[in-house]
Image (cartoon, rainbow, N blue to C red):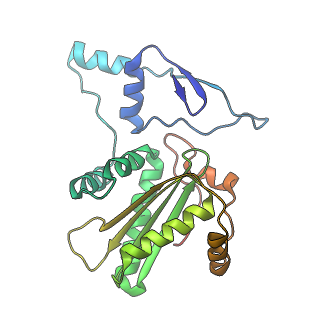
Amino acid sequence: MSFRGLSTYTFDELTYFGYYLEYGHLQLPHTTDREGRRPDMAVFADDWIGRFDEHYLYGKEAPTLQIDERYAQLVAWIERMGFEGFSRVTSVLLDFAKGTREDILKYMSQAVERAAGGRGRSDFTLVFATTLDLGFTFIADSDGAEVGEFLQAYCNAKKYQARVTKWLGLAKDTRVANTLVDHVVYANYAWESDPVMDQVLEELNWQPYDNGFDDQLDAGAGSATPEPPVGL
């Protein structure tokens, strides 16, 4: 089996399933050796299959998906609300490493608190240029004026700035009670140079992302993002 250019080997398919249950995705750590070379092979050596044997043969605890309840609620909310492209959106959210999910929840909470506290609008952005070819933005807004349209335009600009293929944006109107997010945008198309967008970035004074730096934001199966996000 191959994961983003890595040939992977394991005892049987249950090991892949066990890995997914523990980490919540099938992304492998973005690592290099001492000389900066990326590996071309990975071996799943943990005893995930043994956990299934212990459950089905000896009645021990069943293997279950390890996911923060708040994150599961976010994924379920997007699915239940039926936002456009929700199946792709939830798949993207579930692709993030465990530590990145924790960061997303933390930064979302901070942004909502700041917006609700009178700041008006608060946001953060994470970029995973090589590991996922993806960017993620969350916006909390207490003004509510065209936040959906603003989210779309902002994500388009951030996607162009980061030069990635996919971008996911979520927005929360803090004036609306009992919702987790109120707007969702998802884009998936190849990056191409555009003079109009170049002008937009120049007017915003946005410099292109250093992709080598941003790739470290999602560095492994359980890693938290080591640097603060853009915007907070």
| Residue 126, horizontal then vertical, whole percent | 53, 59
From where the camera sits, is residue 228 visible? no
Asked whether, in this view, residue 173 is left or right of residue 8, the answer is: left
Query: Residue 192 is drawn in which quadrant?
Result: bottom right
Q: Residue at x 24, y 76 (%)?
A: 176
Q: Residue at x 62, y 70 (%)?
A: 197
Asked whether, in this view, residue 78 is left or right of residue 89, the answer is: left
Residue located farthest toward the front when viewing the structure as drawn: 195
| Residue 142, horizontal then vertical, whole percent | 34, 82
Is residue 36 positioned above or below 53 on the image? below
Is residue 70 positioned above or below 228 on the image? above
Asked whether, in this view, residue 95 is left or right of residue 191, the answer is: left
Q: Residue at x 57, y 51 (%)?
A: 190
Is residue 170 positioned above or below 15 on the image? below
The number of discs equals 0
Q: Residue at x 32, y 47 (%)?
A: 87
Query: Residue 173 is drawn in which quadrant?
Result: bottom left
Asked whether, in this view, residue 176 is left or right of residue 3, the answer is: left
- Identify which residue, 199 or 122, lies in the foreground: 199
